[in-house]
Image (spheres, helix red, strand yellow):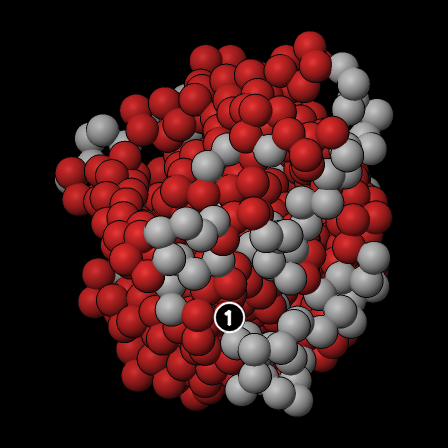
Amino acid sequence: MQPSPLNRALGLLAVVAFGLTNEIASGLFFVSTQIQQSSPGVGNLVPLLMVIGGVITFVTVVVYRFFFASGLVGAGGEYVIISRSLSPGVAFVATFLAWFGFTGSLGTLAFSAPKFLSTAALSLGVAGVGKFFASNAGILIVGLIILWGFWAIHVIGVRLAGTLTTIAMFLVFAVALVMIVIGFATSQDAFANALTQHLHMSVASITAASPVQHVSYGAAFGSALPVLFFGYLGLSTATQTGGEAKNAVKSLSKAVLIIVTLVTVVYTLFAWAVYHAVLWQVISGLAKMKMSSYTTSSGLLQFLMPSWMSSLLNLCVALIVVKTFLPIFLAQSRWVFAWGKDGLIPGVFARTHAKYKTPVLALTLSAIFGSISLIESLKLGFVFGVNIRVLSVMLVFFCMGLGMITFPRHAPTLYTVNTSSMAKNRFLQVFVGVLLMAISVWFSISITLSSVSSPLILQPAFQSVIVVILGIVIYQSYRMRLRRHSPSSDVFAQPPAQ
């Protein structure tokens, strides 16, 4: 491997695909209905909350575009922005926490993907294959094959990964469109009849089992909105392509706006279609009756399809879950690459393959920790890092908001070359920064309070503190090493990691 730059091979479509395929996944097919269990009383407000989540995400788009206009793009995404506008130490600790959360997601994805494939195999009538995928041995073998298979795809080159991600994006659109049409074309009475025929239970008895019967705005805005916002967290993946996007400043500025617009429209229409056909008390009632396998969006709408279409839908949903490896691997490895580029960890992690121009060691580190997470999931049923993903992103957003305030003082040269429309409006910069910080605090408090009844080791706040302490130790070790070898150097005076 050579200390060579990354390969700028990604066009605008591929950049959009990386962000969109990480956003539209479980948030669309799972969380939009499972929210009736985690936040009882949210009821039919889910489509409205999807719109509000999109509006909140537009605040982050404004912040991203502002920093992009100063040339703060590169591998590492938010790390580059926070390190140059606020503090390199804060940037490392915040993104280290986010990296840890993504590692947990990678392991959980490797754990859950075989189960989705099992459901698809069973629906296609391949019972033996389905049972193997659902077994512990099958989950471990298939999970490792999928995980390291996507590692190989990323090692071969970002162009291949971008092509496959673009194909996956169109598959997501196709499946979502089919389910949106079915949902809007079905009345609640028609769904009730189909449900009764399949489950041989009356809708009245199912809705009666629902633990709540009335909509609660407190539940909707106090606990449901932060959970549903999970579906918008994949936007940052697009920023990780900054070292490989063609004309990165313009591409990323356009991409984040396109992604949030598309995702907000798809999420809102999808949720609206599902709740147009399905009475929300049916979802919470089925969950209370221990029939949660029917409470996903695909599990509900399958009653309205012929068997062949239902089987095909299950297969497509399984593929959509598996494709999430593509953007997650990109996000994880580029953070590691950027840290190595800035000397926070051994510089070998910033080296790229002489032929493929990909950060092989950074990708390998992500795959190794993802494999460990998969093995943990077999025993524990959860992964340490997954519980802190949302909270870690809130910390990143908070630091970006604070960076809006400290930017002129911390990096006056970069600040003066900013070409955005709000470059001369200091009041607006501060207002947007404070707004993003307030949103981050609101969601963090909600997430923390919603888990206080869990064992301490499973609480996101406690987990975050442990990882933050570890990040501080690593950063302080770097500072000591830097002072010993080059006391007058300042690696952060250099351009963003490319």
**Is 161 placed left or right of 461 in the picture?**
right
User: Residue placed at 41% from the left, 39% from the top?
Assistant: 90
**Is 216 placed left or right of 493 in the picture?**
left
| Secondary structure at numbered mark 1 | helix
- Place residue 89 in its image quadrant: top left
Nearer-the-camera pick, 130 or 388: 388
* Amino acid type shown at disc 1: Ala
For mark 1, what is the residue?
Answer: 350
**Is 291 placed left or right of 238 in the picture?**
left
Q: Is residue 498 above or below residue 206?
A: below
Residue, far front: 488
User: Residue placed at 78% from the left, 43% from the top?
Assistant: 253
Nearer-the-camera pick, 419 or 309: 419
Pinpoint residue 237: horizontal percent, then vertical percent: 61, 53
User: Residue placed at 46% from the left, 37% from the top?
Assistant: 87
Q: How many residues crowd around disc 1 within 10 Å: few (fewer than 14), some, or many (20 or more)?
A: many
Pinpoint residue 438: horizontal percent, then vertical percent: 50, 17
* Residue 385 visible (yes or no): no
Nearer-the-camera pick, 301 or 384: 384
Q: Is residue 177 above or below residue 275?
A: below
Pinpoint residue 472: horizontal percent, then vertical percent: 28, 45
